Amino acid sequence: MRLARTVNQQFGLFDRSRQLPLGQQDPEERHESDVGARSLIYVGDAETVLRTLPDESVQVCITSPPYWGLRDYGVGDQIGAEPSLDAYLDRLIAVFTEVRRVLRPEGTLWLNVGDGYTSGNRGWRAADRKNPARQMSYRPPTPDGLKPKDLLGIPWRLAFRLQERGWYLRSDVIWYQPNCQPESVRDRPTLAHEHLFMLTKAERYYYDQSAMIESTKDGRRWRRKRTVWSIPTEPLNEAHYASFPADLVRPCVLASSRADDSVLDPFFGTGTVGVVSKELGRPFVGIEIKREYALIAAKRTGLREDQVVAAG
Ligand SMILES: C[S@@+](CC[C@H](N)C(=O)[O-])C[C@H]1O[C@@H](n2cnc3c(N)ncnc32)[C@H](O)[C@@H]1O
């Protein structure tokens, strides 16, 4: 399907003034399949595709960009293979500038970013026994101002840059991974968490606090969710292995969107954000550079082949 035509069709359906796009159904009666019919996966570079989407057309973006210098997705234009940390951060800033444009004024970005350590200018990387085919064949040089063995601090470097560009940094959720990978290092604790930042486009935004609750330790009461979430990583039995656990995505979708609002993930991978959005009655837009992953995502979310759109 041609890109421009599908964008218009899709975002016509997302127009807020047309609240009941599929006939006059009550939203409560709408089925998952209807939501699926209004969802799309674009195959292409995140920034390039985002530039084709209309202003203020999605309610929430939930995403996890590739780590820097860790994984080779084997596709030209992939993010994460930049020779310098600044070049990597610049590319992410370009993507999230477009995300900010396509978000509605009361919209939210949930951003999960991984960290890493400097290479100490080792040009090689120790073997990744779990997935040798996909490890990056090089390690990027140690950035200026950092030393061998330094933690890069990528999540906060990115968060500060986004703040400088107008985003409101509202929360830093620590995603604690109780089943984290053991590490062979003997001179620091094993890394067992990642950051999930909540950023908003404006000072006031949509937030359903009743969706952000957890039970107390004794299980007898509910309280507002705290900023440390213990959620095991979920390996997927398909080609991709850095997928989001659904339990990480679900509270973000529920708190930051209403039924029928559209959800965006510009680094869609195998489409967990789509799976959860569909389950919760929200149409989604996924962007993924690797066609193989986009097709896995389409299968997981029940999209037809003509809903997987090649960009360009
Ligand atoms: C950390 S993974 C995201 C995993 C995803 N959250 C899931 O549940 O499967 C990052 C994804 O970004 C994709 N990617 C890399 N460079 C990209 C680019 N320039 N534009 C769009 N996607 C890109 C990779 O192929 C990979 O699937």
Image (tube, grey):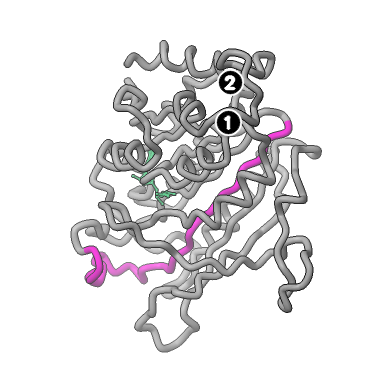
Q: In 3D space, how far apart are the residues under numbered discs 1 and 2 (Cα atoms)?
A: 7 Å
Please, what secondary structure does the residue beneath circle 2 have? helix
Q: Residue 113 in the image: x percent, y percent?
A: 51, 55
Q: Is residue 273 above or below residue 154?
A: above
x and y, in percent, of residue 247 in the image: 54, 57
Query: Residue shown at 45%/31% (left/top)?
Result: 47
Residue 262, disc: 1
Query: Residue 45: in sight, yes or no?
Result: yes
From the viewer's perspective, tell me whether residue 10 is left or right of residue 105. Answer: left
Closer to us: 226 or 195: 226
Looking at the picture, tell me which residue is in the foreground, 101 or 110. Answer: 110
Q: Quadrant of the C terminus?
A: top left
Q: Main secondary structure of the magenta part?
A: loop
Q: Is residue 117 magenta?
A: yes
* Image: magenta residue range: 106-131
Residue 27 — which label?
Answer: none
Image position, residue 233 (x, y; %): 44, 64
Disc 2: which residue = 14
67 in relation to 26, above or below:
below
Say which residue appears at 50% left-offset and 75% top-offset: 178
Q: Residue 123: say if magenta.
A: yes
Q: Which residue corresponds to the image point at 64% horizontal and 24% vertical from the top-left?
A: 56
